[in-house]
Image (cartoon, coloured by chain):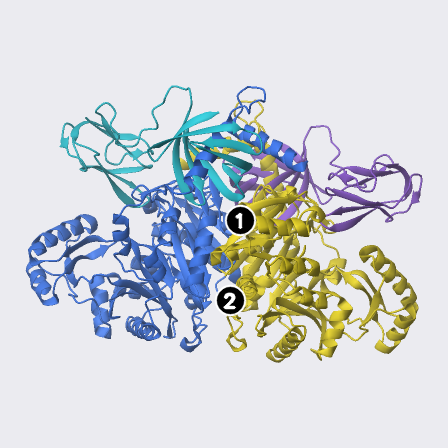
Chain colours: A cyan, B purple, C blue, D yellow
Amino acid sequence: MAYSADFQGRAHRVAVTEGGLPAAVRLDESTYEVDFTHIGGGLFSLIVRGRSYEVDVVEEGEGALVVWVEGEPHHIQFEEEGRRRRRSARAPGQVAGGRRTIVAPMPGKVVKVLVSLGQEVSAGQGVIVVEAMKMENELKASGPGVVKEIRVQEGTGVGGGDVLVVIE
Amino acid sequence: MAYSADFQGRAHRVAVTEGGLPAAVRLDESTYEVDFTHIGGGLFSLIVRGRSYEVDVVEEGEGALVVWVEGEPHHIQFEEEGRRRRRSARAPGQVAGGRRTIVAPMPGKVVKVLVSLGQEVSAGQGVIVVEAMKMENELKASGPGVVKEIRVQEGTGVGGGDVLVVIE
Amino acid sequence: MFKKILIANRGEIAVRVIRACREMGIGTVAVYSEADRAALHVRLADEAYLIGPPPSAQSYLKVDRVIETAKVSGAEAIHPGYGFLSENPEFALRVEQEGLAFVGPTSQAIRAMGGKTSARSLATKAGVTVVPGTTRDLTDQEVLQAAKEIGLPVLIKASAGGGGKGMRIASTEAELAGAIRAARSEASSAFGNPAIYVERYLERARHIEMQILADKAGNVVYLGERECSLQRRHQKVIEESPSPFVDADLRRRLGKAAVKLAKAAGYTNAGTLEFLVDSAKNFYFLELNARLQVEHPVTEMVTGLDLVKEQIRIAAGEPLSVRQEEIELRGHAIECRIYAEDPFNNFMPSPGRIHVLRNPTGPGIRIDSGIYEGCEVPIFYDPIVAKLIAWGQDRAEAIGRMRRALREYAILGVKTSIPFHHRILDDPQFLKGEFHTQFLEKWLAEGFKEESGSLAEIALVAGALYLHTKKPPSPAPAGQAAPAESLWKLAARHEAMRRR
Amino acid sequence: MFKKILIANRGEIAVRVIRACREMGIGTVAVYSEADRAALHVRLADEAYLIGPPPSAQSYLKVDRVIETAKVSGAEAIHPGYGFLSENPEFALRVEQEGLAFVGPTSQAIRAMGGKTSARSLATKAGVTVVPGTTRDLTDQEVLQAAKEIGLPVLIKASAGGGGKGMRIASTEAELAGAIRAARSEASSAFGNPAIYVERYLERARHIEMQILADKAGNVVYLGERECSLQRRHQKVIEESPSPFVDADLRRRLGKAAVKLAKAAGYTNAGTLEFLVDSAKNFYFLELNARLQVEHPVTEMVTGLDLVKEQIRIAAGEPLSVRQEEIELRGHAIECRIYAEDPFNNFMPSPGRIHVLRNPTGPGIRIDSGIYEGCEVPIFYDPIVAKLIAWGQDRAEAIGRMRRALREYAILGVKTSIPFHHRILDDPQFLKGEFHTQFLEKWLAEGFKEESGSLAEIALVAGALYLHTKKPPSPAPAGQAAPAESLWKLAARHEAMRRR
């Protein structure tokens, strides 16, 4: 099984050439022989060239993994080779056909809407304030535009990932 | 749902009269109102008359539960009322139609067989020695009889619960 | 001694107090909101009572419900922990009036120390230096005047302030007018009170606090300082005791000042006096925290005392268990606060379910925690979920143990500050003990990103293997298998191989 | 200092050593048998190498494989932990010959202290009292003669003995002949060596041991005693430091004797001298354990020293980090050994998978553990899976914390000694500190059963609710649901109710 993997903007090719034990994985130009065992949940123990690693794998979306190695997280987007390219999970505020969305980064409560419909906003301007865990967090516009939609009001409870405001 | 429950040789009647929250459970003559929530695995948090209890439930057989409350284990055999009585999981060496079985209490290795086929054994006599975790454990006959079967030899690996020797 | 104590709090501090009570043979009563039925403090307490809906204002801050619950359960005392009702003089007063014991200072002492300006004037009367500035509310004119006398830069602060709100720095005369306006408006919106006063702004100062214990007979002792300069948005991140900056002489001077002020205020129980200390080792009193501090464990680790037990004994009218000359600091202790927030995303709060929790153990490591694997971190409360404390014979060993423990520590499901701590503990300035209250902000200004280093290859390889094992392992027969299941198949196959 | 150390062990002690190395910045190399691929020490080490099949004789005891692995991995030193190869003089010699450092005494010292009779004679030469008896192997005739001189009761012991094997007590002359026969035959079958000797049998004595550290420059210090009288079948169950029985004078006398003997033996690194102490506080040397002891943590908790780090520094040729006068004992520490055995079934070993593991945390609690939730406890090795250690300002606080922690401690899937510890810590004699080496056996003779007390009602109620929730909850629609699933449904319903 071969994958293209995007890590911090760089594309890598990773191919599992042997799935048994020890497994063989080809990463770009080098090959790794891996003795690995499943400890439980998303936790694996890997032994590579005598080095022992504890690895936690968390799935955040299709092919979108957070791989924890020695306490350090690595966000990697995997694509199975041959499959049609999927767009990776969109980051908050990312441009999609000229639309910018202000997305709640966590569950919480809307304490203040700082803009009104049709208002012009500039990059970095505060758009809405969401409170969670006794902290107010001001969400800012990632770029200039006009407020097209305000989907919440002050006092509304929101879930992580909810689109709160749309700017065009 | 009503059960007859055997705990340390005494029979009790336990009936869940309300399964919602708070639940109502009738134990013999008294009724308990129970606020309970599942924490994970076999672990529950119970609040009964303001008292908070952590309870771990482990199933050892059909209706055979070990219920841990505040670090103390309770082996209880439950029978659903109305159902035909089942014999509870047989204890090692228990008499069954005149047969006594010597059962391995844990996985290990047979290091010595102390009896031979047809030999007469008395209650408490050492029959076989099983080693596990660097400790030798001599298994004794629970009562007198004649050795009818020896199902293992010295050096054999055995699993917990395996019948090793049959005495009649 | 009390037979039963109600703990009017939640999370790690409620668990901490429950443990102290249990070790003393005292019964414990937990209170909980509807969001906390399955919380650890409810599981561990002897008794537990629901006191309201999730929002604090309707549960943990409800004075009547808490006191009513104490009476119903037959508790003789109430421990407020920190936050919530802990420094609310009306609550302390109600507890006193209801004939219950409050595990903390008297309502008068709390009130006297509550207002910033009143605490400042009390300190001045007691002869304890405060940050140069005014001790009463000022008009804009008076502020301008005072600023000139004190000397720039100045800090304009809301009298009712807290948590860094209603604070403005003015470095030049030109900035003064704007700073005053901003401070007043923020103060009135945040606290409904536009009153402000002025302090000299001390740059590159350290935040160092002194722990004291005072019994009802008037005995007061100090237990050494805590170094709390590592802060983010006025929120402490890492604390240690002793401070790498404090020598025996400064410690004694800080301790004497703390004791003097506590006596002047008629203060009882455990308390903490916060000071700013400049590079010349001059110190200035900031405020007195009339409660147990989040960071109290580092003091416990070096003194060997159990502060919560001392609090309870004092509340029960017992004299202090130690005299000043009996108190000695052994070794060095460091605490890392574990917040449920995302260090890679501007420290956004990160509530949710904790899917994986692996606590470090072993020599010199202590964890005070309010979480367990599978628990929910609610959106309603403070983001501190746990505290990791390391003790060593000296600072170097304490740091070594903390780094070792942080690496063993795994919390997945919610984002936490653990990766943030990893980096701080590798910082050469931190290792040298050379930092001040603006250190972390400056440090963070450079940005905090994921490592792209040597472990990336392993992460890429592991990720591919993980996805691969989710497929029907070729050449094995096809057919979709659930991830977990096939993983277990794999594990089983591996098992089989190993057994050979 | 070494850059890399190989740990020739498994389980909690391998984890303990790995942590010490990591805290010192030293690389760690684990070795493992096929049964231990997923063991904690393999997960935590920097490197890990398979050295053979599950049985110790084919893996952890394979001198060649271990040394070969050290060379391949580039380790400069080998830490043997306890058990396995730790007191094998041939192994120590091989390590020395291969130019590696052995983290322990020299092979000569191990050999000198290995044979019981040789150790006894060395002690006698050094002027340290031993249990009255003979210092060489005897003929049956000599045994009878010696027994008369020493006075009954006597203990007939195998010279090559250990672990209570080849030991027989004779209380009357009549019993002597039989005891000699029994001891010889057991000795030859167990150790392939029928040699025996005689000692006076001390009744109601205490087993007290003294920890020492000795560097290569000949400096030797003692770190205080450990009370180890609570034993079952000569296996220690609970240890503490200091001993409630030892006063400053006895401690000094024990310490001086230990240092004297260690110097006479040219002993280096960490070692423990075991003594029997009678009710008149006379002490008799038993043997010297030339390695780290299982119970070393209690000494670490009261002295503040890290014994494993001291071992490593000594092995690297560094001088001791402390002088005798700098060593002070603070507070009191207790250790409960957690064995995978069934206290309700004659302590039968209980290997298997650990389905549930909840470690206690909080003030004064330390866990040295080799297990994790979901791990397998193999049938091949020692039944110690973890050690729970509690520290307090005094013995009472240490006991209070231990009881609190034991109650939080949950290990399910395998049977453990935790319920056994619960009972011992409630025993009035234990609380008074009044016990001796036969105490537990006598105590156990009365039988050890499950409590039938106040918690039984809750257990019955909870069990019924558990079974009930496995059924389609009436009045909800029928249809079989898997237990877990319906439990979650239930939890979800409850969630929903709470959110209202």
Q: Are marks 2 and 1 in contact (CB under 8 Å)?
A: no
* Residue at the image position 86 percent from the left and 34 percent from the top: B97
Looking at the image, tell me whether mark 2 or mark 1 is earlier in sequence order.
1
Pick the front one: C429 or D231: C429
Above or below residue D114? Residue D350 is above
Tell me the number on the disc at residue D304. 2
Q: In whole angstroms, how far apart are the C-alphas of marks 2 and 1? A: 25 Å
Q: Secondary structure at mark 1?
A: loop
- Residue at coordinates 52% horizontally, 32% vertically from top-left? A24
Q: Kindly identify which residue carries mark 1.
A: D45
Q: Residue at x 82, y 73 (%)?
A: D134
Which quadrant is the C terminus of chain C positioned in? top right
Say whether residue D422 is visible.
no
Whole-percent x, y for residue C3 in the image: 50, 61
- Badge count: 2
Q: Toward which corner of the image does residue D210 lie, by quadrant? A: bottom right
For this rendering, which residue is in front, A115 or C242?
C242
Q: Residues within 10 Å of mark 2 (few under 14, many from 20)?
A: many
- In the rendered structure, which amino acid carries the disc numbered 2? Gly
Answer with left or right where residue B86 lies relative to residue C324: right
Position of D259 relative to D95 (above/below): below
